[in-house]
Image: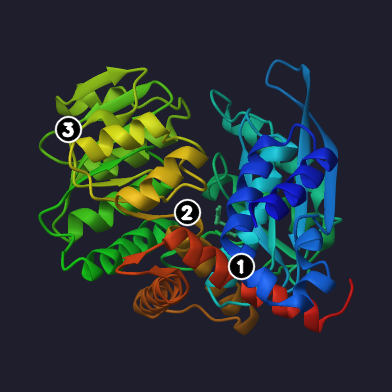
Amino acid sequence: MKADINEFLTALKAKTAGEKEFHQAVQEVVESIWDVYQQNPRYKKAKILERMTEPERVIMFRVPWVDDLGEVQINRGYRVEFNSALGPYKGGLRFHPTVTLSILKFLGFEQTFKNSLTSLPMGGGKGGSDFSPKGKSDNEIMRFCQSFMTELQRHIGPHTDVPAGDIGVGGREIGYLFGQYKRIRNEFTGVLTGKGLAWGGSLIRPEATGFGAVYFVHHMLSLLGKDIAGQTFSVSGFGNVAWGAITKIAELGGKVVTISGPDGYIYDADGIHGEKIDYLLELRATNNDIVEPYAEEFGAKFYPDRRPWEQKVDIAIPCATENEVNLEDAQLLVKNGCFLLAEASNMGCTADAAEYLIKAISYAPGKAVNAGGVAVSGLEMTQNSQRLNWTREEVDGRLHIIMREIHDTCVRYGREGDKINYVKGANVGGFVKVADAMLAQGVV
Ligand code: 2IT
């Protein structure tokens, strides 16, 4: 079995040299689904895996714009339309200097399985740019978004491809992108999600990724006979996902003691709650991408250039970016008594950290834990099609059900003795639906 997997991966790597994040994401899925693949000769005959690992379409384009000093700037824009077996391509846009084709291919590949797990009719895609919003003025961000959409609009549409936000793309950017799409196409449609409430957005979408992650953790804890209340949490990041997770944990009686940024991390022994949670939004709005000011504001401790995983906690929820927990971090967490790690970031753990955590504690991967964000994007699309806005209770109620069902799927496909292998459960559960749809739709 190992030899066959290696043969497949060697061929993939030869075709996609240098795309190391993409290789990491594919390897994890292939190892999880290999048994199912072998048991189903129809998949092999139709070359489902070879097709699934080749994006249906990749669009790369120049994004020229003029900065506040009148200088011309050039960035690269991307949209990876990975898989449309289950619905229109769906997934976020990331604006960050680390964006490469490899990063967006890994994210688009993961998105395909994540979207499948939500049970909503969405294919997988991802896009973005190496543009850095850090330190940019509002006008510069608007001009960049307008230039980006001037090209992207040719390739997307409410029945074709529906982007949303990711790192560096929030409500403000979605507004500028939507405005430019509407102006060029002369159409008011649900072509993007994460829109403002007055112009087609959904209640709970800003909270959805973080809330959904905590609902998922609640189900993981239930299986262990435990509860959120009374547990101590470490969280990384201080953006939209961390904000949503901390809000829900505080509401349910848990205590979050860390947040982090590119500059280091904060340890707040008293826990992050109340006005401290609102302050995260202020900090984000400064566009400086540093977390240190929290320490001065609330008298907490700041550890420059370090990661929060060295603190003693019960539960860790990485909410920042890929590969933010390495093997050493994972071992330190477990040594200090951490018994559960749920990734709210996409591929938050390195491959060796994930392998270790599967055996050591209760560990769940991003494509299951953070699926609440795209799930509520799917519900935003439904509301746009109906030309209706649902109540907060309606959306949150559906989010609860979706997260419970994703957890059920992980348990169904991931049970190994008295443990749940959530990585296997999520990968097999997500894969089977996409593979069967591809079989039904022929060689396309
Ligand atoms: O990683 C993700 O699932 C997202 N950034 C959200 C995608 C979406 O379409 O809402």
- Between 17 and 323, the one lying in front of the other is 17
Comparing 152 with 143, the one in front is 152
Residue 436 appears in which quarter of the rendering? bottom right
Question: Is 329 positioned to the left or the right of 116 in the image?
Answer: left
- N-terminal of the pair, mark 1 or mark 2, is 1
* Residue 268: numbered disc: 3
Question: Relative to 142, is 55 above or below?
Answer: below
Quadrant location, the N terminus: bottom right
Residue underneath mark 2: 366
Could you tell me residue 192's position as x and y percent?
65, 60
Secondary structure at badge 1 equals: helix
Q: CA distance from mark 3 to mark 1?
A: 45 Å
Of labels 2 and 3, earlier in sequence is: 3
**Nearer the observer, 193 or 430:** 430
Mark 1, Cα crowd under 10 Å, few <14 / some 14-19 / many 20+, is few
Q: Is residue 320 visible?
A: no
- Residue topped by disc 1: 35
Direction from residue 341 to residue 11 in the image, left or right:
right
User: Is the CB of mark 2 within 8 Å of ligand 1?
Assistant: yes
Q: Which quarter of the figure has residue 120?
A: bottom right
Distance of label 2 from label 3 (alpha carbons): 25 Å
Quadrant hosting ligand 1: bottom right
Residue at the limit of the structure toward the right, as seen here: 443
What is the number of callouts on the image?
3
Residue type at mark 3: give it: Asp
In the image, taking residue 184 as reference, residue 284 lies left or right, namely: left
Element on which disc 2 rests: helix
Q: Is residue 60 above or below residue 405?
A: above
The amino acid on which the numbered mark 2 sits, given as a three-letter code, is Gly
Q: Identify which residue is drawn at 18% across, 42% down.
A: 337
User: Which callout, 3 or 1, points at the residue further toward the start of the chain?
Assistant: 1
